[in-house]
Image (tube, helix red, strand yellow):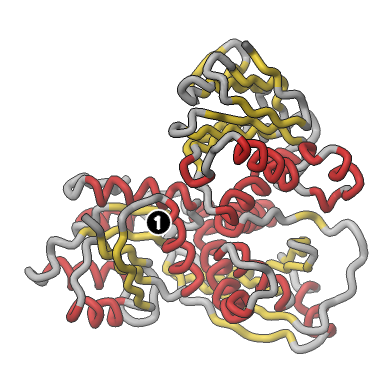
Amino acid sequence: MSYRILLVDDSATTRGMIKRAIQLAGLPVSEFLEAADGKQALAQLATHMVDLILADLHMPEMNGIELAHAVLANPATAPIRIAIISAEPSGSRLLELRRAGIKGYLRKPCTPESLRDLVVPLMENRHAPTVA
Amino acid sequence: MNIVVNVSDARVSKDTEDVLVTYSLGSCIAVSMYDPIARCGGMLHYQLPTSTLDASRAQANPCMFADTGMAALLRDLDALGAQPRRMHVKLAGGAEILNDSGLFSIGKRNHTAIRKILWQRGLLLKAEEVGGSQPRTLYLHVADGTTIIKSRGQTASL
Amino acid sequence: MRQPSPELLLEALAESLQTMAFICPEPVTEEMPAPAAADCVTVRWSGDATGELQLATPRAFAENLAASILALEPGSPEAAQRAGDALQELCNITTGALLSRLCDQPTDSPEMGLPTSSVLPDAEAWRRFISQPQTSVLMAEGCLLAVRIQESPT
């Protein structure tokens, strides 16, 4: 079994770092798709199904929470697991993430190891909520 | 038998009776690497983050520095048949000691340096216990890769 | 929200650099010439408090930053291509790290903006930048790196 992962972040550098960390974690990933904001992510999802979305919160067009709402409201994409990786400083917004059905959260700056520890359980156990 | 890894030293072993041990880790860092398939392991105990601080000392004693020390450790492990991508990498040390604390401490610089080297070489850490102000002793059992930390009378697996 | 201090700002910058880019900033211990040009990135926030955080540094550091985050050879074309983006992301993450230190109530929820880039075109512009209040200058990878915050009334 191999996975397809969609990386959504307006920083191409961060997308590259996340991709490398997941590759080094040894997960069987068949394809990484990339998008610079929520709108681009939805356009990708219109033609590609993925197993996991790792999204930033603050992006120029459609932020991570709006993306999560759109993905989870569509029966075709609702089974996709979504985790947020963001510099968001507010604790109260984490509650909003949990309510939005997001399965994991990691605060930037993050180490490659913390990315592995976020992603591996999400892929290995589809129903394990890891929002702190 | 216990094989002592001194300060600025690296040792490897494939003998399942051996335990690699390094004492007195303060701001220094010990890197433990273990290949569970080849059943061999090694340990480096370095003092400083980069050989660019003193090229002549690095030549005389590469294990004093994170970069040249890791190159030496990996070379010795390679000779025993270890493969980097299979290895379990663990760190201990990097404490802030006496009047060397805060943002610019040598312990922090030592820790950041080894993380950068591992990232460049494509290795993720399996575990670490770094920082704080306590001295540490690290053991690596070559039989199964078990690592144990002793610090201020407490013993814990890493 | 707590008031920002130079110590909290440097802590946030050091945490960001060490964690995401494997770089340890150091104090400036010797006189360094002002860079002939520098990139400058700004992230603003609003809500419970309003302010901005700015980073300024020569392009050489931004390229090293990108190379370090992506495990590329320093001086590689991809590192040069990613330099501006990497510096924007460092500023974004440092701002988040600072604001998370300033949020001391569960209801504190400052709204961060997106990073914007500008250029300090000459040494004089650099000197003006670092002479502003609440500005600190560090060394990172052999380059000068300046960071400043400015708070404004809400």
Q: Is residue C133 visible?
A: yes
Q: From this view, report whether residue A77 is shown above or below residue B123.
A: below
Q: From this view, report whether residue B35 is shown above or below residue A92.
A: above
Chain bearing mark 1 = A
- The residue where tag 1 is placed is A22
Task: Kindly identify the residue that appears in the image at 70 percent across and 18 percent down.
Answer: B4
Q: Quadrant of the N terminus of chain B?
A: top right
Q: Is residue A96 visible?
A: no
State the image coordinates of residue C129 (x, y, percent, origin top left). Answer: 75, 77
Q: From this view, report whether residue A29 is shown above or below residue B76.
A: below
Task: Kindly identify the residue that appears in the image at 62 percent across and 35 percent down.
Answer: B31
Task: Kindly identify the residue that appears in the image at 33 percent across and 52 percent down.
Answer: A27
Please name whichever residue, C109 or B74, is drawn nearer the observer in this view of the structure: B74
Q: Residues within 10 Å of mark 1 (few under 14, many from 20)?
A: many
Which residue is farthest left?
A75
Q: Amino acid at mark 1?
A: Ile
State the image coordinates of residue B10 (x, y, percent, origin top left). Answer: 71, 31
Please name whichever residue, A79 or B126, is drawn nearer the observer in this view of the structure: B126
State the image coordinates of residue A54 (x, y, percent, origin top left). Answer: 33, 63
Q: Is residue C86 left or right of residue A10?
A: right
Q: Classify residue C123 by image quadrant.
A: bottom right
Q: Classify residue B154 by image quadrant.
A: top right
